[in-house]
């Protein structure tokens, strides 16, 4: 999303520390156990604001992504980026421009954009390193 994090040289960066907190997942967490054993309880747990991820982490990423999105909207005419977040912002504004047509398109809401961006960050953070670690482990144990 055009954010310079530099996680190799600056491991204390807030993005790095918060994503590590998010990925520190405990399978013995009572919330996870209840959701796994009693899936019908998940809607009730959502109503009670239980979450698999720490609230401070989700709040940090939500605020950071909201700031990035608002900068993109404010600087719309200056610099057009071609990335995932910009495509979602463009789809949000495209739905708001054409209200007089018969087939109005629904643009994405802020919550949808920020949620998809969170999933994108979460899904893409540690996949390459985990895959390479598994590959090297298999190559070392099975020459």
Image: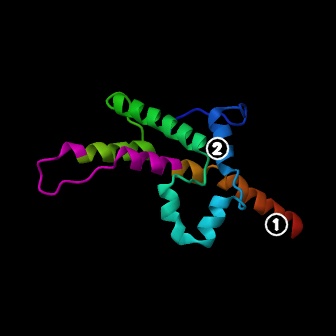
Task: Answer whether residue 103 is magenta in the image.
Answer: yes
- How many labels sit on residues? 2
**Residue at horizontal 35 percent and vertical 33 percent from the top:** 73
Under tag 2, what secondary structure?
helix
Is 16 situated above or below 74? below
Residue 16 is left or right of residue 80, and the answer is right
**Residue at horizontal 66 percent and vertical 32 percent from the top:** 13
Could you say where residue 9 lies in the image, as x and y percent from the top left? Answer: 73, 31
Judge whether residue 122 can be spotted in this image. yes
Judge whether residue 83 can be spotted in this image. no
Residue 80 is left or right of residue 96, and the answer is right
Mark sitting on residue 54: none
Q: Are marks 1 and 2 in contact (CB under 8 Å)?
A: no
In which quadrant is the C terminus drawn? bottom right
The front one of 52 and 129 is 52
Could you say where residue 21 lies in the image, as x and y percent from the top left? Answer: 68, 44
Could you say where residue 58 lies in the image, as x and y percent from the top left? Answer: 55, 44
Residue 8 is left or right of residue 120, and the answer is right
**Residue at horizontal 66 percent and vertical 65 percent from the top:** 33
Which of the 4 quarters of the picture holds residue 12? Answer: top right
What's the CA distance linking mark 1 and mark 2?
27 Å
Residue for badge 2: 19
Could you say where residue 40 lies in the image, as x and y percent from the top left? Answer: 52, 71
Task: Answer whether residue 130 is magenta in the image.
Answer: no
Residue depth check, mark 1 versus mark 2: number of the one nearer the observer = 2
User: How is colour applied across the structure in the image?
Assistant: rainbow
Residue 18 is left or right of residue 118, and the answer is right
Q: Give the magenta range.
A: 96-118
Mark sitting on residue 138: 1
Under tag 1, what secondary structure?
helix
């Amino acid at each position: 999303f055009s954010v310079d994090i530099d996680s190799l040289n600056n491991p204390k960066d807030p993005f790095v520390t918060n994503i590590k907190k998010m990925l520190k997942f405990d399978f013995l967490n009572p919330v996870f156990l209840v959701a796994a054993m009693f899936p019908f309880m998940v809607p009730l747990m959502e109503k009670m604001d239980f979450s698999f991820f720490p609230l401070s982490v989700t709040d940090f990423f939500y605020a950071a992504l909201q700031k990035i999105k608002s900068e993109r909207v404010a600087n719309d005419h200056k610099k057009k980026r071609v990335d995932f977040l910009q495509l979602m912002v463009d789809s949000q504004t495209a739905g708001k421009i054409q209200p007089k047509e018969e087939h109005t398109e629904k643009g994405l809401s802020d919550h949808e954009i920020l949620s998809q961006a969170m999933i994108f960050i979460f899904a893409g953070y540690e996949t390459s390193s985990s895959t390479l670690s598994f590959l090297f482990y298999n190559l070392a144990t099975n020459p």
